[in-house]
Amino acid sequence: MNDEPAKLIASNRRARRNYEILDTVEAGIALTGAEIKSVRQGRVNIAEAYARVRNREMIMMNMHVSPYKGASHYSQELDPARPRKLLLHRSQIRYFGLEADRQRLTIIPLRLYIRNHRAKVEIALARGKRSHDQRETIRRRDAEREMARASRRSA
């Protein structure tokens, strides 16, 4: 199989700020024909999306895929935020489900992309940050930036 670079469609930029990322995995998404055309056009939003394990299947909730303009009437009747099945190995589903339940974690999408002509989503097992944790992260990033500036000036 040819390994072409992934084409980024959408990214969840707030995820790394609001969550501490513990583990990530790549998953496929089960989409209809009109939905994949809409995804290829970039008409998708994953900012409010999250995943759940239901009946030994991983389901993506609240991922909004806008209806494709050239699709048939039936395709446009589908709910844009309907639950979508994620394609993972059984062991990965079991691991993510158990860890999310055991440690009270959330499963969130980090980015959605097309690789080898297939839609993929990178999902992460994440723990929500408290506001003081977020401030600490910002403070640490600013300090590192200042040190880098100072080292560039002195060199």
Image (cartoon, rainbow, N blue to C red):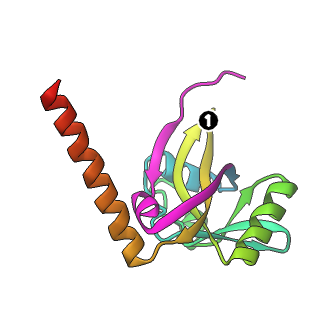
Number of residues whose C-alpha sits closer than 10 Å to that of mark 1, classed few (under 14), some (14–19) or many (20 or more): few
Q: Quadrant of residue 51?
A: bottom right
Between 7 and 142, the one lying in front of the other is 142
**Span highlighted in magenta in the image:** 1-26
Image height of 126 relative to 11, above or below: below
The residue at which mark 1 appears reads as 117
Q: Could you tell whether 112 is left or right of 131 in the image?
A: right
Between 146 and 96, the one lying in front of the other is 146
Q: Quadrant of residue 139?
A: bottom left
Q: Position of residue 63 (x, y in %)?
A: 54, 66
* Residue visible at 55% across and 72% down in the picture: 62
**Which three-letter amino acid code belongs to the residue tagged 1?**
His
Q: Quadrant of residue 83?
A: bottom right
Q: Could you tell whether 121 is left or right of 131 in the image?
A: right
Q: Position of residue 109 (x, y in %)?
A: 56, 59
The kind of secondary structure element at disc 1 is loop
* Residue visible at 21% across and 46% down in the picture: 146
Q: Position of residue 111 (x, y in %)?
A: 51, 51
